[in-house]
Image: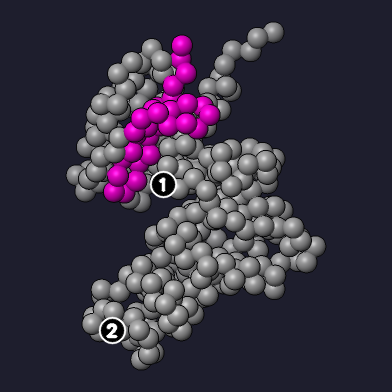
Amino acid sequence: MRDRIVAIDVGGTRIRVAVGQADGRIIAQKARATQASQGHERVVDRIVETVRDIVDDWSRVQGIGLAAPGTLDVRKGIVFEAPNLPGMIDYPMQARLQSEFPVPAFIGNDANLAALAEHRFGAGRGVDHMVYMTISTGIGGGIIADGKLFLGWRGFAGEVGHQTLEAHGPRCNCGNIGCLEVLAAGPAIARNARAALHAGRESALRSMVDDNLDKLSTAMVTQAAKAGDPLARELFEHAGYYIGLGIVNLVHILDTELFVLGGGVAINAWDLLYPSLLGTLDRHAMPSMRKGVRIVQAQLGDDVGLIGVLAYVADRLKETEPRVS
Ligand SMILES: [Zn+2]
């Protein structure tokens, strides 16, 4: 019986592979270092090796799926650009997986698939209009509309972190100016902390890094804010303000009921961000549209990408199943 799905989650530091089921259950998993600096061909070889290590019986596997960061044409199965995987440009990932393994292969954007996972098995269960945002070193996302993952023309939809919030703001990694990501993700919080200390602001952060500002990390700012340091708290309020503005835009455009926030920064600094982003939503959203909108924490933790792939592969296989008339 073919009741197993193989899920691959490729990040900048780790390749994770799981064997699981359409109901989101993970049966076995294995991780390996991505070693992105060795080039994308080597990364793909390592993905293939990791899958071979974990799957011993292909007769039980119905499909395989891969989640990757970056821009992907999910229908043609091509990775256009993956910022954490240097050299992976216009790469025919689906065809490569298809040639290596004896089952149908699919690919998707990691944040999109995380949205699908939270919708089906996590904080978004039973909600038909949901946006998932992951806030860590970057800000990614996925849109659930009418109960389905909204992909857009080529599958690029859901880049909630690259909405322009400051037309004259700092330059983002994506090339645009003043994106939510460059204003509010982890590196922005650390960068703003360094700038404030350079400008002479007093803060416990200064002694935490022995006055060596290069050592300052987002985790340290989080720690200082939790201990009540006024500057550190202000920096999270500032980030929460921009995340709130991003949510206001999405409420106005999509009429979203539920926002599910995941990723290291959102989870570790939830109490620091939440009042600020909620206040921003209250002040900026049209009152009739703001009513009933909820913002909650993600529930699925580290495995969210893998669980998303399980759901996604199950969905795509259903689409291609021959219809019984
Ligand atoms: Zn951007």
Q: Is residue 5 left or right of residue 248?
A: left
x 31%, y 49%: residue: 12
**Helix, strand or loop for disc 2:** helix
Q: Dot 2, how many residues are within 10 Å of its Cα: few (below 14), some (14-19), or many (20+)?
A: few
x 58%, y 23%: residue: 319
Mark 2, residue position: 207
C-beta proximity under 8 Å, tags 2 and 1: no
Magenta segment: does it hold 172? no
Q: Work out whether residue 176 can be spotted.
A: no
Q: Main secondary structure of the magenta part?
A: strand
Q: Is residue 284 left or right of residue 20?
A: right
Q: Which of 58 and 142 lies nearest the eye of the viewer?
A: 58
- Residue at the right extreme, as displayed: 288
Amino acid tagged 2: Ser
Mark 1, residue position: 302
The image shows residue 207, relative to residue 169, as above or below, that is: below
Specify the segment rendered in magenta: 1-29
x 63%, y 13%: residue: 323
